[in-house]
Image: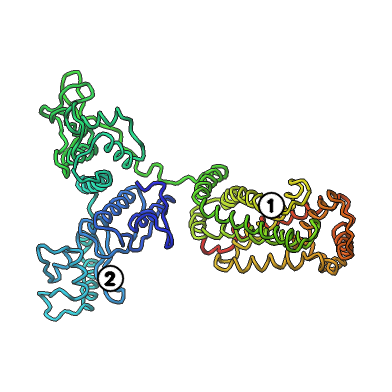
């Protein structure tokens, strides 16, 4: 019933603590490990949920997986599921190592007596802590338990195999039935809010949908109600009828109340005669149940046998190929993307507000010309900073999840591409919102798409810095690092007035043209503005600034200023994405 639910975090409440614990275990089981280590997996779970978890792990062990866990204060029915247990005393020394079923007999053979109504698992802890009196040794100190065990091991080595070497008990029908009944009861109370113990067809349909994640049709619900209640005119079922019927489905023939205790074969012949098998009418029953019988030509009922199944068949996990992993990871990222609509709306609002403020300052307060490169510098730097900050979460927010998946065979290239593709849509939308609000308020008198493209190239290059920083720097430090980088590569090295001194040849010009975003993006916006507006300023200051901008940005390129700048920014964005992939692939190798 918690499928498709948010797990939650410290700030945001999601599923309960016990459900979160089971989700964590399920995540690890999804990797199909051969050896599974668990540290206190039952902490935070009630007794029934702990037993259900242990039963699931026991069944996985029967398929060939080895489970090793540390556990405290288990109920005895859970304790006896373990094949072997290791009880440790103070200092981590061994007090007992053997089968779970042999622990009680061992301690009793050493002179400890257990009360009839005592939980053996708790009693063992009391013995180890020195809280239980020993009938053989009057003043027994807990440290003496270590010597007792060493003597027992020495005796076993001399006399042959230890009698405690038997395995723990297997899962039986009583365990399954108790867990199933408890889970069904929980789901019943979720729907039966008035607590009358009776459900109509609509309530039963919702209950079945919660249990199976599939909503049954009205016809199926009606037929199930008839079978549960034993009447074709029934309009409701009780909790007892519901539990009895569904719990009996673990047998080959369900306990169908419409057949009045008689169970029939597929041919319609009554199988309630001598020699047939019936499921136990009680919820905890099931012992001695045989397979459904079939009738031969001589009229004699014989048990139906099936070919034995190989329990290890299919246990080996086959990792999907690159294309399949890209599809799976992209779908998962899309689900996460959809769940972030609130955060996305907040970020888009921030972008729109920032663009509106900058446009208002340029138009109404500073009254700078629409071709002013200083205005473009502020715009491009602001967009680059916001985009880079947004992209920090692409690879930085789920690093522990990625490390675990990478260690279990996930394709790093598929993971990288899936997250990159989904995030690209956000970058385009954010750039469009930022540019549109500024364009509407500023009214630069140039075609919108020509005005928009330089900002898109700026966002492409700046997002590469966000990706790269997120793969090499912890998320808590990423904001500071990326802010410093954008200030340098956009605000400092891309300042049009400083470029007059930077672009004089030599190593400094090479560095500026290699890493500065605004060195190229401002050139694109300036060329578009000049070609569209053909400015002829009359003010002496504007004439001087226009001449400076033309000397800096309208230099001779074989393919033109706009196309040269576009190619530089594309190459910069691609190089940063490739560096991000290398960082994702080779950083933190010890955790992958």
Mark 1 nearby-residue class (10 Å; few <14, some 14–19, many ≥20): many
Which residue position is annotated with label 1?
435
Q: Is residue 176 visible?
A: no
Q: Quadrant of residue 277?
A: top left
Q: In this figure, which colouring scheme has been used for the structure?
A: rainbow
Secondary element type, mark 1:
helix
At 54% from the left edge and 67% from the top edge, which residue is drawn? Answer: 476
**What is the CA distance from the residue labelled 2 to the residue labelled 1?**
67 Å
Residue 560 versus residue 454: which sits nearer the camera? Answer: 454
Which residue position is annotated with label 2?
88
Residue 206 versus residue 363: which sits nearer the camera? Answer: 363
Q: Number of marks in the image?
A: 2
At 42% from the left edge and 52% from the top edge, which residue is drawn? Answer: 6
Secondary element type, mark 2:
strand
Nearer-N-terminus badge (2/1): 2
Q: Does residue 186 appear to the left or right of 402 in the view shown?
A: left
Q: Position of residue 242 (x, y in %)?
A: 21, 38
Q: Quadrant of residue 108?
A: bottom left
Q: Position of residue 347 (x, y in %)?
A: 57, 56
């Amino acid at each position: 019933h918690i499928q498709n639910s948010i797990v939650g975090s410290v700030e945001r409440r999601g599923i309960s603590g016990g459900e979160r614990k089971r989700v964590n275990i399920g995540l690890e089981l999804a990797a199909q490990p051969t050896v599974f280590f668990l540290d206190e997996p039952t902490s935070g779970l009630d007794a029934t949920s702990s037993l259900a978890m242990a039963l699931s792990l026991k069944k996985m062990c029967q398929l060939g997986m080895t489970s090793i866990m540390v556990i405290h204060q288990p109920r005895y029915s859970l304790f006896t599921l373990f094949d072997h247990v290791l009880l440790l005393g103070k200092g981590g020394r061994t007090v007992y190592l053997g089968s779970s079923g042999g622990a009680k007999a061992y301690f009793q053979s050493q002179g400890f007596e257990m009360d009839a109504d005592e939980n053996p698992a708790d009693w063992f802890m009391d013995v180890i802590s020195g809280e239980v009196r020993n009938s053989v040794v009057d003043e027994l100190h807990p440290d003496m338990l270590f010597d007792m065990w060493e003597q027992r091991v020495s005796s076993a080595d001399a006399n042959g195999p230890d009698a405690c070497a038997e395995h723990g008990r297997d899962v039986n029908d009583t365990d399954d039935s108790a867990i199933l009944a408890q889970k069904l009861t929980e789901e019943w109370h979720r729907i039966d809010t008035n607590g009358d113990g009776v459900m109509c067809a609509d309530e039963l349909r919702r209950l079945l949908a919660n249990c199976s994640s599939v909503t049954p049709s009205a016809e199926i619900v009606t037929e199930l109600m008839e079978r549960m209640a034993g009447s074709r005119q029934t309009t409701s079922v009780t909790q007892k009828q519901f539990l009895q019927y569904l719990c009996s489905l673990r047998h080959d023939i369900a306990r169908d109340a419409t057949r009045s205790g008689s169970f029939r074969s597929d041919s319609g012949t009554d199988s309630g005669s001598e020699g047939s098998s019936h499921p136990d009418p009680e919820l905890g029953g099931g012992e001695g149940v045989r397979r459904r019988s079939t009738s031969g030509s001589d009229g004699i009922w014989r048990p139906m046998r099936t070919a034995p199944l190989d329990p290890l068949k299919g246990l080996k996990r086959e990792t999907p190929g690159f294309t399949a992993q890209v599809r799976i990871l992209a779908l998962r990222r899309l689900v996460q993307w959809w769940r972030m609509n609130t955060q996305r709306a907040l970020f888009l609002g921030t972008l729109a507000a920032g663009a509106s403020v900058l446009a208002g300052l340029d138009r109404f307060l500073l009254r700078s010309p629409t071709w002013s490169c200083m205005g473009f510098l502020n715009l491009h730097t602001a967009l680059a900073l916001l985009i880079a900050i947004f992209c920090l979460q692409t690879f930085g927010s789920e690093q522990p999840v990625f490390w675990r998946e990478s260690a279990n065979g996930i394709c790093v290239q598929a993971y990288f591409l899936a997250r990159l593709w989904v995030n690209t849509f956000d970058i385009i939308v954010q750039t469009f919102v930022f540019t549109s609000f500024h364009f509407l308020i500023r009214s630069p008198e140039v075609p919108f798409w020509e005005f928009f493209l330089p900002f898109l190239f700026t966002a492409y290059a700046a997002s590469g810095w966000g990706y790269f920083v997120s793969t090499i720097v912890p998320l808590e430090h990423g904001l500071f690092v990326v802010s410093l980088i954008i200030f340098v590569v956009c605000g400092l090295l891309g300042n049009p007035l400083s470029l007059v001194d930077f672009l004089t040849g030599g190593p400094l010009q090479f560095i500026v043209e290699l890493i500065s975003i605004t060195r190229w993006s401002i050139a694109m916006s300036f060329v578009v503005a000049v070609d569209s507006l053909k400015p002829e300023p009359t003010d002496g200051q504007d004439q001087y600034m226009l001449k400076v901008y033309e000397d800096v940005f309208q230099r001779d390129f074989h393919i033109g200023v706009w196309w040269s700048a576009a190619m530089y920014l594309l190459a910069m964005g691609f190089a940063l994405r490739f560096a991000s992939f290398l960082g994702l692939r080779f950083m933190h190798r010890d955790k992958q």
